[in-house]
Image (cartoon, rainbow, N blue to C red):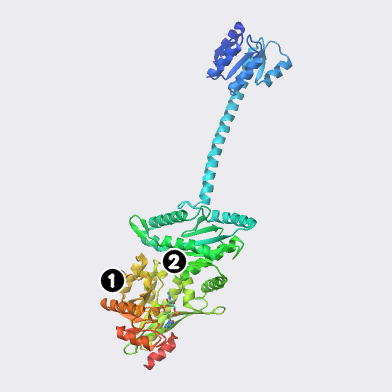
Amino acid sequence: MINILIIDDDVNARNTFGKILKLKGYNVEGVKSGLEGIGLVEAKFFNLVFVDLKLPDMSGLEVIKKINSINQDTTTIMMTAYASLETSIEAIRNGAFFYVIKPINIDEVLLLIDKALEKQRLSMENMRLVTELKEKNSELSASTHKLEHLAAFDSLTGLPNRRYFEENIQQILSISKRHGQKFALLIIDIDNFKWINDTSGHDVGDATLKELSLLLKKNLRKEDFIARVGGDEFAIILRGFDNYESVVAITDKILKMFQLPIHIDSIDIHTSVSIGVTFYPLSADDVKTLFKQADVAMYKAKSKGKNCVEFFSEEIKESYTRMSEIEHALQFAIEKKELYLFYQPIVNLKTNKIVGVEALLRWQNDKLGNVNPLDFIPIAESKGFINKIGLWSFEAVCKQGEIWNHHGVKDLFLAVNISPVQLEQENFTQQITDLVERYQVRRVKLEIELSGSILRKELNLGAKNFLIFLKQVQFRLAVEDFGTGYSNLTSLTEVPINTLKINEELLKNIQEGSKNYAVVTGAIALAKSLSLETIAEGVETKEQVDTLLKLGCELAQGFYYYKPMSAEEVTAILLKA
Ligand code: C2E
Ligand code: MG
């Protein structure tokens, strides 16, 4: 319903005009004074207000002004008997939509009303759109803000993410440059985080990350900038630090902090971290290089056995350059036929007879020369090349087994090293089964060597399947590096092991009464009680042989007997025997 108000002290004019408008379907009210009119406009909404220019209590222009200030949506039209141009302009300047001249020409006025209402409708629609737009804008800016937050912060830990960190470190660097300040950049990587995810599930993995982030936040100063820059990687800027000694205290604290078990859903999660450190401006003065240096140092810490800190140095830089070259060249090693196997005989300690050989990978590259497996296997593992390389060496061993079969070599077992990374592949067992069938390997005795570190953790599905497969095809399983690291004794009874290999490190200083003597004695006794065979690795001296014989070790492998050699050399020795 359209509400119209007529403010006119002339009662006749008011009534006649009002009646006509009512007949046209409008809701009309009339008052005789300005104040009454203003009062009504304050109390309710009128679409149109006709105001006579001359009112008893105040000027019509003042009333129009007042009404416009009360409600901008109300349209005012001035009525006047004196149609001078000045007054009309004055009325419009005071906010009137238009003016009508008395006596009123009703047709003209009705037309004017239509126009005024149309304009009012449009302007109200306009206002509505503007308000809507404003609301949308504020919604948009709220979600933009949220998006910016999401883009800058990690949703799991609430820490700044890599992008934000990179922007921020650039700023910190500029400020430090201007003020001659120093800082240390730390990259912290959780060791074996994949194991936590694989064995305890992603929820526990997530909870662990959250907990570790909290620990970091709690234990560092406010001005230290922490971010989560990768799945299991954090970066920290320690401002004001510029030397080794001052950072050691902090990194020690971080290492210790991460070594404590974290309790999640009544499970104790054991973690450790590897930390790489570099300094601005001592080591580099640009973000990219600093990041790379801290990363390289962190990798160095990993290769040193994890759970430690490494500071970037020129020496590390060189080894990193070599690591990058190895990584690059390794991708083409199989296609370029650069890989081959050496075999190291394993002998019976009592008879000196060769009972088996261990296949050991060798790599000869044009540019890099002979690369040590200890240098390229960890890289192959971390870059995922080990799956292809491992399969290649397994196939090469199968082929060699066939050759020895043809030569009539009997009762020789072939030991193959398998990386724990290979076991993580779900189709690993299938790949090995295919090779075994293709080469009829059942006629050869195979022994699979796995690192003792796999006994430390719960086995994943791939590894469990593989162990079942080993049992089915009656391949033997040897656990290496026994006695060092973290071999878990209870899992020795759960996994179908045949052989324990005693690490060469334990054979050093093995004289009676030494710590190593005690460990080796214990390892051999344990193996015996579980009916396992023992192979001592890295035997180099007669003294070691004597001690091992005394302790009841059965087999040995080492330079004292044979160095790793080509298959042809092994064949020659075997055929001579
Ligand atoms: P490993 O399985 O413990 O192999 C024994 C290592 O000890 C070999 O080093 C061998 O050359 C060395 N060795 C043998 N006798 C002596 C000795 O009397 N004194 C000393 N000091 N060392 C001795 P190599 O060939 O450099 O291999 C190093 C490691 O690389 C192996 O340790 C194994 O973990 C890994 N590896 C080698 N081939 C393969 C492979 O085909 N696949 C996988 N996944 N790993 C391999
Ligand atoms: Mg081995």
Q: Residue at 48% of width from left, 68% of height from top? A: 301
Classed neighbour count for the residue bearing mark 2: other residues with Cα under 10 Å, few (<14), some (14–19), many (≥20): some
Task: Give the image location of residue 25, x and y in percent.
Answer: 54, 15
Say what secondary structure mark 2 lies in: loop
Split into quadrants, the picture shows ligand 2 in the one at bottom left
Tell whether 163 sits left or right of 218: right
Dot 1 amino acid type:
Thr
Q: Residue at 54% of width from left, 48% of height from top? A: 148
Dot 2 amino acid type:
Asn
Classed neighbour count for the residue bearing mark 1: other residues with Cα under 10 Å, few (<14), some (14–19), many (≥20): few
Task: Give the image location of residue 519, x and y in percent.
Answer: 33, 77
Does the closest atom of ligand 2 sit within 8 Å of the Cβ of label 1?
A: no
Tell whether 291 sits left or right of 491: right
Q: From the viewer's side, name the closer residue of 5 and 382.
A: 382
Task: Give the image location of residue 173, x and y in percent.
Answer: 60, 57
Q: Which mark is residue 493?
A: 1
Q: Which mark is residue 307?
A: 2
Evaluate if marks 2 and 1 touch, with contact meaning CB atoms under 8 Å apart: no
Q: From the viewer's side, name the closer residue of 117 and 82.
A: 82
Q: Nearer the viewer, mark 2 or mark 1?
A: 2
